[in-house]
Amino acid sequence: MLYLGVSGMRKFTTACGILLALIMTSPVGSMTADTDLGSRAGSGPDFIVTDIWQGAESWMIGCTIENRGDPYSGDIFVNLSVNHRYNQSYELLWMGEGSHQNVTFEAGYDYIDGQIEVMVEVVLIYGPDANQTDNIRIETWDLIGPDLYVENLFVHPISFNLTAIVVNGGRCDLHTPFHLSFYINGSYVHTISFNGAIGMGERVYIPLNWVWDRVSTRNISVYVDGWSEVTETNESNNHFSKLIEKWPSLYFVTPPAITGLGPINATISWNCSIPAKWVIRWGTYPGMARIPETLSRRRNGTLELTSLMDETYYLFYVIGVDDFGRRLEGGGWFTTPQATGVEGPMGHFNNSEVWAYSPYRELPLNAWDDQGIENIEILLDGYPIGNFTPLGADQVNGVPLDLGPITEGNHSISFLVRDKEGNERMIHGNMTWQRPDMGQYPVIGFMNEFRPLYEGLSLLSAVVEDPDGIQRVTWYVDGEVVYVDEPPDGATTYSSNFFWNTEMVANGYHTVSAEVLSTLGESSSIISELHVNNEVEQEEPDLEMVRLPLRSEGTVVNVSFSVHNLGSDTAESIEIRDNIEGFVPISGFIEAHSIDDDATVWTVKMDGGSIEPGETRTISFECVPMMNMHDRRTIGWPMLLTGFPRRFYTTKLSWSIPDSSTTYVSYKMLSAAYFEDGSDLDEGTMSILSDANYLLVTNPARLFDVMVPRADADTLLIKGTTLASLKTGVVAFLDPDDPFTLSSGGVRFILNNMA
């Protein structure tokens, strides 16, 4: 039995605090809770192991023990075995009626690829158990196998077809068909089957055969599953949803134009309806500069072109790409005016030579100036590639420079010569470069092995490379041209993506090929056969869950989830398990236990009942912030998923459907929670600290130093927190600087006024 005694109570004022002592008089290791005892079996106590779970660290294992029979006072043993071998045992003192206790075996287990069998047994020391058939619980955990999940959904910026990216995150390849159930705004659309193999760690692009109208906002949900034919290591991450909202219009409010012009400079300006990333190409010939100028994401763009030639005709081209991958293009031309009154360096460049590749070259520039030449900047195709300093010489014959590899053909070369007085002269020329022997180019290869495809849009990708530049990539299906892809000028490596609508072809094998053409007119191609099967399957049930904004009332923080049934059947036995850090749960849950060494991280289990198709239900629990050693608080603490060292989840959702033995489990990585006033979690918690008096549990790890097992400390924290949270103006905490011991007198709580 648990009762609280209060001693040494004094009236408090604003000048001093209150010291209260809560005395826990139960012996070490004993703790009861007021819960429904459920049905009793026979005469005498009836102990049962109701649940087994994985701990957060060191592969710990936890369990829940209940007495569903007559009251029992005395010791019991709780024994753990892993893979038929004894692992660890706890002796507990059980007092009184009913209730349950959580036990965590800290010895844990070594990681094993494959399956492990976990067995927990409860044994009475004094007297027989009324029903010994339920004293043992055995669970088998799969730690190896495929794991299918939808990584993302994307809309193609040109065709607006929707495609799902499916990944096998498991530890083995999958050669069995799996299926994608597709929902729009909660309504089932169709199911698409994928019959090809997907290797461990590989991803496939599966078209969903749906074209977005670009106007309406749609909530897209996809559920990937192998049904009964595929056993996954994680069935909880098969659901993916994404909100597709109307794209804003992309257009030039003010088209690109010359807003400033001089003999050696020009300014290009434009204004766009929405932000975009920009590429600007310019030059004196249609090919323009080999390396374009780039500007970061913005709506208004301005680019200053310098070191131009006077009385010269120039072209410019502005290309924008918005956040959705759409392109916006514009351009024009201008002629620089004649320079007047220019004094300074003079010179010329010898254009008659044809050069082969050499890592070091002396460029045939002749320049002179009576004031002395201070610096010469070299530009190739309009872009700086080096500097030469003549140290004030009044004449220069030849400029040494390491040009590096240059593509074959004609190039423009410019020299910005500056004298000691600051006068400048741009000297222009052309050079013809002879291509070196660089092997067989261009080269092309598919980015990943082709897989069988199904109805709708399919993304095919190829990577091409040529040091002289790539002119275009042409895609063929059954010998007919279906798409021509032109990379940016000067690109030497390029990934070409072709979105193929397989509904336009019959089922069966089709020849798909891609051909690359370099800027020198050389070509290479690659070919493969691809199987198409435009068939669909039936739907599967699905639940969608989101975390609602947090609410707080003085002491208590309310954590709520909105669960919506997207399927066509009733979802039963709904259960939510949420991980929290720096909070102690006090109500709204059917079970809660700490899962770390210092009781700052908890798993809270809630009962969601059943939800009809199309119905939405809110499921909540309440908790109170604590102060711990590192002073962190998190609603939705990320926990490592068993068998996947880089996969985390915050919340576990499980349910079943009528007349079925299948339990659906979804591990969610929900986003950070926010308080209703807009502040984030830490700020909101600190607001409660400063504006309200509430329970603070400091250093709960001290309890574990003197209480074994941790189940009793968990119950103590929940009981004490629940009671103290009702005391307005009172804060309870364990003082880390005040040593205490746990004896028959119990645990001493120090209560202070935080006003």
Image (tube, rainbow, N blue to C red):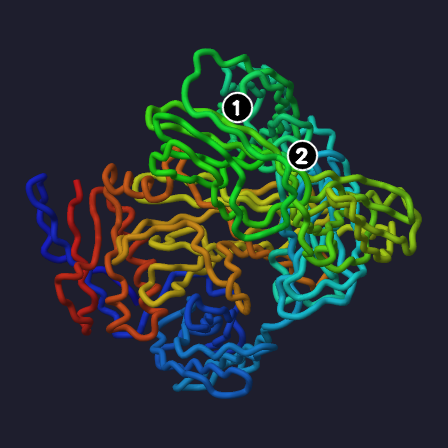
| Vertical side of 676 occupied by 621: above or below | below
Viewer-side residue, 520 vs 483:
520
Q: Which of the pair 459/57 is nearer the observer?
A: 459
Name of the residue lying farthest toward the bottom? 85
Q: Amino acid at mark 2?
A: Arg
Residue carrying label 2: 218
Q: Residues within 10 Å of mark 2 (few under 14, many from 20)?
A: some
Residue at 17% x, 70% y is 745
Residue 655, x across and y down, in percent: 62, 56
Please give left or right for residue 11 compared with residue 129 in the image. left
247 left or right of 735 in image? right
537 relative to 72, above or below: above
The location of residue 690, given as percent across then percent down, is 23, 39
Choose the circle earlier in sequence order: 2 or 1: 2
**Is disc 2 in contact with disc 1, using a CB cutoff of under 8 Å?**
no
Q: Quadrant for residue 108, please give it.
A: bottom left
Question: As drawn, which residue projects farthest toward the left?
Answer: 15
Mark 2–mark 1 distance (CA, rounded to whole Å): 51 Å
Label 1: which residue? 308
> Which residue: 72% across, 63% down?
198
**Quarter occupied by the N terminus:** bottom left
Q: Nearer the viewer, residue 334 or 724?
A: 334
- What is the x, y in percent for residue 343? 41, 18
Q: Nearer the viewer, residue 708 or 244?
A: 244
